Image (cartoon, grey):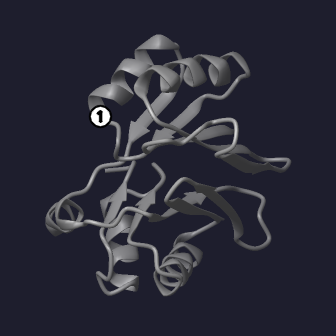
Amino acid sequence: MKFVYMVEMPNLDPASFCGGFENDDHSCVIVGLDNKETAKELFCKYTAEGYDLFNLCSGFTPEDAAAFEAMAEGTKVRAAVYEGDQVEKIDALEDFSKYGAIFVAAGLEAPKEVRLSGPDFDMTGVYITDQESANAAARKLVEEGVTFIELCSWFDAEKTQSVIDAIGGAVPVGSCGL
């Protein structure tokens, strides 16, 4: 699988806010940008390179995801959303400077962290293999001071709730799988 996670925040430059990993099962990229035009350019670049699964941070809407998906046949694109009491928590959040994201990736022997920094913004992406390791990663992210967490499209409502429960609702949690 070839997977891209796009983060839209002010002043992020995709040339410097980019990281990920590759193994026999996955090629994973996290890339930051500061506008939707750059997102379209990067989407075209990555689809041309064979990437076919895109998850977008909550700076994008489900409608944005549908528009991207329509641009490239066979590509799956999902945007992170918040549901229930998580909507109120994210709407009340004033500090978006420490961001955690959790992604499922096959072929890992242990969780793999990718840390990226931009102007006034730090992100830790954690690649895991199952719900148990996702819950543990979320607890660690909260201990490290993230102010919100977003999950890849593997996390349906039940799996997302498991993460919320694992951290005792300490920070808002959104998911690309809702």
What's the amino acid at mark 1? Pro
Residue 52 is drawn in which quadrant?
top right
Residue at 35 percent across and 42 percent down: it is: 59
Residue 10 is drawn in which quadrant?
top left
Nearest the eye: 117 or 85? 117
Secondary structure of the residue carrying numbered label 1:
helix
Label 1 neighbourhood size at 10 Å, few (<14), some (14-19), many (20+)?
some
Nearest the eye: 166 or 56? 56
Q: Can you say whether 146 is above or below 76 in the image? A: below
Residue at 53 percent across and 82 percent down: it is: 144
Query: Residue 46, position in %: x, y?
Result: 66, 24
How many discs mark residues in the rendered view? 1
> Is 42 placed left or right of 25 in the picture?
left
Residue at 52 percent across and 77 percent down: it is: 141
Q: Can you say whether 162 is above or below 108 in the image? A: below
> Is 70 placed left or right of 52 in the picture?
left
Residue under label 1, please give it.
62
Query: Residue 100, position in %: x, y?
Result: 49, 65
Query: Residue 121, position in %: x, y?
Result: 50, 59
Residue 12 is drawn in which quadrant?
top right
> Is 148 placed left or right of 71 in the picture?
left
In the picture, the quarter occupied by the N terminus is top right
Nearest the eye: 66 or 93? 93
Q: Can you say whether 142 is above or below 24 in the image? A: below
Query: Residue 151, position in %: x, y?
Result: 45, 58
Residue at 84 percent across and 50 percent down: it is: 23
Q: Can you say whether 112 is above or below 73 in the image? A: below
